[in-house]
Amino acid sequence: MTDTAAGSEAGGAAAEDARGRVLHATGADGAATAAPVIRTRDLTKRYRGGQLAVDGLDLTVPTGSVFGFLGPNGSGKTTTIRMLMGLIDPTSGTAEVLGRPMPEATRTVLPEVGALIEGPALYGFLNGRDNLLRYDRADPTADPSTRRARVGTALERVGLAAASGKKAKAYSLGMKQRLGLAAALLRPRRLLVLDEPTNGLDPQGMREIRLLVRELAAEGTTVFLSSHLLDEIEQVCTHAAVMARGRLIVQGPVADLAARARGRLAVTTPDPGDAARILEEHGITGLSTDGDRLTADAPPAAVDLADLNAALVGGGVRVRFFGVERGSLEEAFVALTGEGFDVAG
Amino acid sequence: MSQAERALLSDPQGSRNPLWTLGLLRSEITTLLRRHRTYALLAVLAAVPVLIGIAIRIETGGGGGGEGGPDGGAGPAFLAQVTNNGFFLVFAALAATLPVFLPMAVGVVAGDAIAGEANSGTLRYLLVAPAGRTRLLLVKYASVLVFCLVATLVVAVSALAVGALLFPVGDVTTISGTRIGFGEGLARAALTALVVAVSLTGFAAIGMFVSTLTGSGIGAMAATVGLLITVQILDSIPQLSGVHPYLFAHYWMSFADVLREPVYWDDLSKNFQLQGLYVAVFGSAAWARFTAKDITA
């Protein structure tokens, strides 16, 4: 219990810090960039059972970004997405998508939003093409005269053109996922919301999705991508937010987030004892030794790594490897959520 | 923000096609008609007149064209007349299917309408398309009504075909004893099918309401059909005659009054009013529930 309290306190402080920075950033270039594509204020959802799924979420997704939405299973990501899409009414707080309030403005907002929510859902007894035709007919603003052409284009875009005549129940999970993506791409969209888009895909499929996301982003579509695969986020996203236990822990540009996980100074040497002593003398902290490998907190920017290396060598330490290993988003994530990928109770 | 709004307004595709609801309805109906389940239901309904026709044929064929069974009045209505005029098989088949088979088929389709989509997850994609909750509910109900009519017509047409095949057909003697031409008889049969289809609208509305309550298609179907059986049992208990006029199935058999000369409208109009009441009450309940519901499936 005390453990958890300490953890969330630390998380809270981090969030405060991040929020301040993000606000500052929007303040700085707010005039230059358009209004955010998604903006929530104190968005909260408490389910009827009393479970607090989303707790006071202040999320800002800048226009044109590829926004990674991270969090362990059960952290409230999908509930948030459903509130943004008007499927669930928030208990309190507000959500704006494309500058309009949700769920009130669903009919004007959603035609410009493509969504893949919690995996694809298809009519098994219809073939791939007819599934897309049905979803397109459900859109009141879709032009019926271009319907077939748009469906064909979407199928080609996700690589399903050859299998479009097959019944959807015969599709593999990866093909279903592609068809779900195609449904989100039936029209040019200003915002794409993709909830776990690479689920069920093989590595080749994952790479194709990443390419597709980059391509769409280059066309000017804002992509809101939820995932628990950190390297996926790190590879394609410009911005990210991290949720845990229904709360937003941090949000900002991916580079900043990764930088928050400070790198580790790593030294490989047959003389770890001497190396540790010398590094300690130079004010390096957090030393730990594992065989001939020595790691420590990265030195402050004022310290030149070359000087440090020279000191080691000057002290008679034989250095095989010396350098700072950059922090990954995963380390930042684990540090922030304090619980890795465990399912929140 | 103003930029976003301007972009939205200037978007040529942003304008709503006024006829899209019809497109959605067409999509709904063709989707319904492409399910094997729909055909299984219709096949069962089409088989009922065949069974009745063959049974009557076998029974009377041996007896040398006797007047039906020993006590023709106690069995389902119109059976006795079928041997003389195959045309009456239409009415016999409707009388046989209306208490259970027809509403059961409607209950399956109506119960599955929303719950089935929720169950398969397709509901969330229809709603983010965005189909609109009220429109989707209306379109779903309209397609269930179309199914009511199609199901009734399947029974009637199958009965007419079997009747014409197995028995002589000719001028029709009405319940009032007068004779009308075969052509007019056919018109009355068509009217009867329409009346039977309208009789099912109240029950269909109940099915839609049940369908908005659950995320399980099977559960909604079972609940709807269970409700039907319960009401039929209640309607057959004489001690409960006080509530009978309010049971949606109570005036169902009034369709026979179409075959009177002139048509006797009293019970028919009571039936229509009752169905209207059920549609209004359960339609509103379904709307209130569906438009306020959190879609978590």
Image: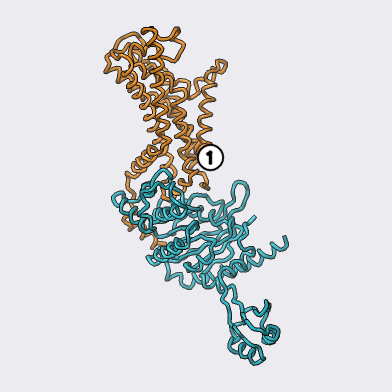
Going 67% across and 91% down the picture, which residue do you hit? Answer: A315
Which chain is the one coloured cyan? A
Q: Is residue A283 above or below residue A4?
A: below
Q: Nearer the viewer, residue B281 or B207?
A: B207
- Residue occupying the far bottom of the picture: A314
Q: Position of residue B129 (x, y in %)?
A: 41, 50
Q: Numbered disc 1: what chain?
A: B
In the image, B294: left or right of B76? right
The colour scheme used to paint the residues is: by chain
Q: Is residue A211 left or right of residue B219?
A: left
Q: Where residue B136 appears, x then y in whole percent?
A: 42, 42
Q: Which chain is orange?
A: B
Q: Residue at x 34, y 51 (%)?
A: A142
From this view, report whether residue B66 is shown above or below residue A53: above
The quadrant of the picture occupied by the N terminus of chain B is bottom left
Q: Does dot 1 land on a helix, a strand or a loop? A: loop
Image vertical order of residue A270 relative to residue A115, above or below: below
Is A8 displayed left or right of A218 in the figure? right
Which x, y percent locates residue B111?
48, 35
Give the percent coordinates (x, y) of residue B105. 44, 30
Kind of residue at badge 1: Thr
**Total number of numbered discs in the rendering:** 1
Q: Is residue A256 visible?
A: yes
Q: Which residue is mark 1?
A: B214
Q: Nearer the viewer, residue A10 or B80?
A: B80
